[in-house]
Amino acid sequence: MQTWCDQQTWAGGSTNFRRPLDRAFQILQKSLDLSVGRTSMCQRAIMFLTDGVDDTFNEGDFDAVQLSAMQYDAVFFTYALGSGADGSKTKRLACDNKGVFYPVPDGANLADIMSSYYEFFAHGQEICSSSFVKYTDSGAGHTLYTSCMAMYDRTHPTPDLLGVTCTDVNMLTDISQMKSTAGWEHFVCTASDMTKMCRSVQLTDCHRQRIRLAYSAESVCSVSEFQVTPDTVCPCVEGGCEDDLDFRDEKNYFCDTWVSDDCNNPNPAWGYSTAGMAAIKEKCKKSCNLCQWSAGACPRTDARECPVIPIATECRACLGVTSGVDLEGRPMSCPAVSPRNLISTTTGLILASEASSVSPLAMPHVLLLGYFVVLAVFGANVRH
């Protein structure tokens, strides 16, 4: 295999940053096509890897990438692999686009370093409701339904993820008996709702700088209003800024479908009225990223507890527009046993990346393409 690789024409080739980046944005653009609407794109991120140097990538290229990243609200995680990689340009790509630069030393554990992007989302998202997953255990081959909940250290102004605890629903009762009861379809629909809900990422540049510093001093961006130390206290969101979980906009979408969309400048093709957008900004402050930040360092000494999120008595597929698949891999729809169904039709879109059901904490799906990775965290609903 090594001999064959060495004989190929690309063995003596060069590094090109622009082509894979253009392709990444083409994928994001296609996924948001109004006629396709394949993904809700709760958060959009690009993981860019290189072990070389691209001398042709210039100032205009940086500007074009930044413009596209702003258009699609995409965060960059960049990785310079080994001593021969260009660290300056990969670092600027991350700093220009609200991301993190990871210099990877020769011989380092690339898998561990690449997977640390989760810390970015863990710092920016506080998950206050359970997530569910259906899987087959590796021992006896039983089908299990598991509920998982994040745990946080709240002794600091910003909660830090400690880990995740999970409990199999099968421990409560026999699943085959549960499936024979009238409430099973409601459980599947509601558990899917909770798992697929989009969570906004709330980070200032101070938080991003701390995340960078936690990895390496080389990762800290020099062009920033925040130059942090391990003891720096960043701003925090003022209390009481939450979405109205019962609110549906004039197109029947829930608040969390607005995560990563610009509520101040919505796409005109979506057809929202001025009054409709005003209602969204009033009811969906968290998903629209309109919460107020403290002026300067957070005045609190510890983080707030999660708000109490009541268990829904009706599935969201009965009350508003949903998409994707449920725990059983079926298109989201209102159960027949529901007391009412305000939405008579569903999108019926089954995302290829969601066809294997939903996963704990809405873990991201990764598409590897050559020297770059497009990473998209998929959530609940397709507006487009």
Image (spheres, rainbow, N blue to C red):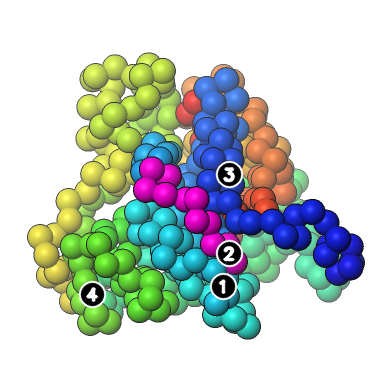
CA gap, disc 4 and disc 1: 29 Å
Q: Left or right: where does residue 260 sit relative to residue 50?
A: left
Q: What residue type is labelled 3?
A: Arg
Q: Are marks 1 and 3 in contact (CB under 8 Å)?
A: no
Task: Name the one closer to the observer, 264 or 184.
Answer: 264
Q: In this view, does 108 lie above or below 140?
A: below
Assess disc 1: are there few (<14), some (14-19) or many (≥20) residues with their C-alpha within 10 Å of its C-alpha: few
x and y percentages locating residue 216 in the rendered image: 40, 78
- The residue that disc 1 covers is 84
Please tell me the numbered disc located at residue 241: none
Q: Are circles 2 and 1 on residues that touch, CB within 8 Å? A: yes
How far across and down, in percent of the image, does residue 165 sit? 54, 72
For badge 4, the amino acid type reads Val
Residue located beneath label 2 in the image: 52
Residue on which the image places disc 4: 228
Q: Residue at x 30, y 58 (%)?
A: 203
Q: Earlier in the sequence, mark 4 or mark 3?
A: 3
**Magenta residue span:** 50-62
SS type, badge 3: helix
Label of residue 19 in the image = 3
